[in-house]
Amino acid sequence: MYYPFAGIQHPVRGNLIRPRRVPSPDEGTRRKISARIVDGIPAHYGAHPWVVDIRILYGDGQSMHWCGGVILSEYLILTAAHCFRSSSNETHFFVRVGQHRMYATDRYEKDYEIETIKKHEGFDMATFINDLCLLKVQEKGGHGIVFNDYILPACLPEADAV
């Protein structure tokens, strides 16, 4: 896959457009969508396997939620450029996948260091135009993010369907 605005080209291994257990884009359109997140209905574990918790790391080793993101592939996370307005230092952040509960450790959650932060070159903080950013995670044990039933890339439409 090639992400022109970020200048990143990364080989895609296997079928990452529609991995197992992820609904097709047509199925996804039939889901009931709720605008409420706070005080909404709790999601069951694994309901959103593509969601990423981008965390800021403090000098004392503690971390806290900073922004959200979406898994695109084994190595790439899509997030918002405004999340990195004050810093693009990869060592200040890491991503957590497979997380369900914010304040407890979940069985399948894993942390990955960030290798590269690439904000859209046309991002404008005043208007939030082009508020896009790609994160490339560092390899861990010879691979990127390891997929399972609780950690999967987002289900995206085929290129010719857009």
Image: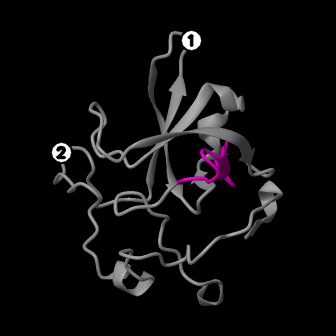
The structure residue drawn at horizontal position 65% and vertical position 44%, both measured from the top left corner, is: 81
Looking at the figure, which quarter contains the C terminus? Answer: bottom right
From the top left corner, tell me how far across and down residue 120 is, in percent.
75, 51
From the top left corner, tell me how far across and down residue 58 is, in percent.
54, 16
Location of mark 1 (residue): 59
The structure residue drawn at horizontal position 65% and vertical position 53%, both measured from the top left corner, is: 132
From the top left corner, tell me how far across and down residue 35 is, in percent.
29, 58
The structure residue drawn at horizontal position 40% and vertical position 61%, both measured from the top left corner, is: 148
Is 55 drawn above or below residue 97 in the view shown?
Answer: above
- Whether the magenta-drawn stretch holds residue 122 is answered as no
Is residue 124 among the parts visible in the rendering?
no
- Whether the magenta-drawn stretch holds residue 140 is answered as yes
The structure residue drawn at horizontal position 50% and vertical position 15%, both measured from the top left corner, is: 61
Instruction: Label 2, secondary structure: give it.
Output: loop
Residue type at the position of mark 2: Asp
**Quarter of image, res 33:** bottom left
Location of mark 2 (residue): 39
From the top left corner, tell me how far across and down residue 77 is, in percent.
59, 53
Q: Residues within 10 Å of mark 1 (few under 14, many from 20)?
A: few
**In the displayed structure image, the side of residue 144 where residue 23 appears, left or right:** left
**In the displayed structure image, the side of residue 22 where residue 40 appears, left or right:** left
For the residues carrying marks 1 and 2, which lies nearer the camera in this image? 1
